[in-house]
Amino acid sequence: MTRADVIIIGSGIGGATLAAALAPSGRRILIVERGERLTPSPQDRDPKAIFGDGCFRPDETWLDGKGQPFNPGNYYCVGGNSKFYGAALIRYRREDFLPRAHMGGSSPGWPISYEELEHDYTAAEHLYDVHGVVNEDPTEPPHSANYPHPPVADEPDIADLRTRLSRAGMTPSSVPLGVDIDKWLAAGQTTWDAFPNTCGGKMDAETSALAKALAHKNVSLLTGAMVRELIADETGQITGITVDGHGTLKAPLVVLAAGAVQSAALLLQSANDAYPGGLANRSDQVGRNFMNHNSSAVLALHPLRRNRSIYQKTLMFNDYYNSDGNGGPPLGNVQMLGKITGPILASQTGLPGPIAALIAGRSYDFYAMSEDLPNPDSRVTVEGNQIRLDWKRSNWAAHEALVERLKTHLRRAGFPIVLSRAFDRRTPSHQCGTARMGDNPENSVVDPFCRSHDFRNLFIVDASVLPTSAAVNPALTIAALALRAGRHIIETEFAA
């Protein structure tokens, strides 16, 4: 496609979902992706290659707030980070859209309500073929329709765990999942989180939304195309983008969907004489309010009880999502991790292989997740092409309280040994917030439909627009916002 009506930068959940929403309009849509498609390889199912050697991690270095270099765990490929995600497609709870107090501060709420996004949540669940059930989790917000598929069944040892957790006072429920479990397991009896999807078993951005978009002849995908800058004129228009190997590409409408860090970096790197602070940055909020979930892996062990599960990510509980259990502030969500194996544990801890295998074979592996609160000093900045990520973690006491409550319940459920380990900056846990949504152009970057306050022909549809991180996986919310933005674009830009 040599000419386009819309250019979308990035093919992850936000960009691919928007492309799927716009495709039936007949307008010419060009998706520009810096990476290539993943193809099947021996490393796809090799835990040492993935967790030990980091074979899919980018050859890239960022700086932290102290100027120390680190290798980020972001992925650049068609489908983006979703090619490696756990496909937990959970709605933000109704309370997440409202201002509320936390142990470490407060979250400001959203400029839209849950009810305004509910139908887009439903549409996103159908686009990503989500397996789930509505009536198990007491924090589940109202649905206008059921999930398109029933929940993925527990394997026998997880079914036993569900019973044990119930007896220990928890309310376990099924994780809403985007997965074709038969297809995934047919490609190799392997676990889930961080393993790349090259078999179509995960309902990721490429497998679901992008495939539907590219079924339309008016949609095309350009890969291996690194966007260096957005070009803006003094009249408040984005006039084009500069792409390695392709020069300047132009379209009447430009959409940024490169992820919370890269979208902010690209706007800042696109500064010019008319916009010395970067594009879309009249509010000085681009790059600010970076959030990354407070997360820990928690392993419950019993020396005499085996966990023979292959796919264990079917269970979660939200008993402490809206309070600490005693009328206090919210603590967060707990869900199963993809099954830890001996090679994974050995690569992450340095334990000898036989000991790691012994522990992993008797572990039930949980992911505890708490909200990180927006802070304008937690931010992405750039110096030339160098990205600096100064993440100022917040609300950590709430996360520690969640982990301690989880450990208590696991001991009550019959596990005498419970271990935990927090994730650090090298493990992105749902990065978001650097181009926040809001009604006021003085303190936000985009409006409630994800349109830039400063440039009418610029939209941003990735995790950067999230005003708060909540305490569940953001992928479904990003998809719902992209569908909402797509509908708005069709009504306001394509109607003429």
Image (cartoon, rainbow, N blue to C red):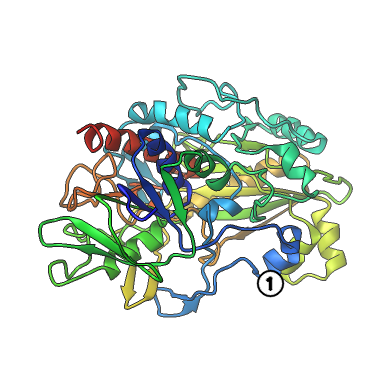
Q: Which residue shows up at 54% across the image and 21% down it?
A: 146
- Give the side of residue 239 with respect to residue 18, left or right: left
> Neighbour class for label 1 at 10 Å: few (<14), some, many (≥20)?
few
**How many dots with numbers?**
1
Quarter holding the C terminus?
A: top left
Q: Position of residue 99 (x, y in %)?
A: 31, 39
* Tag 1 residue: 53
Q: Nearer the viewer, residue 89 or 158?
A: 89
Residue 495 showing in the rendered view? yes
- Give the side of residue 100 with respect to residue 231, left or right: right
Q: Position of residue 114 (x, y in %)?
A: 37, 30
Q: Nearer the viewer, residue 457 or 453?
A: 457
Q: Nearer the viewer, residue 255 or 431?
A: 255
- Where 320 falls versus 30 (above or below)? above
Q: Which residue shows up at 40% across the image and 27% down it?
A: 118
Quadrant assignment, res 49: bottom right
Residue 480 showing in the rendered view? no
Quadrant assignment, res 311: top right
- Where 350 falls versus 448 (above or below)? below
> Which amino acid type is shown beneath numbered disc 1?
Asp
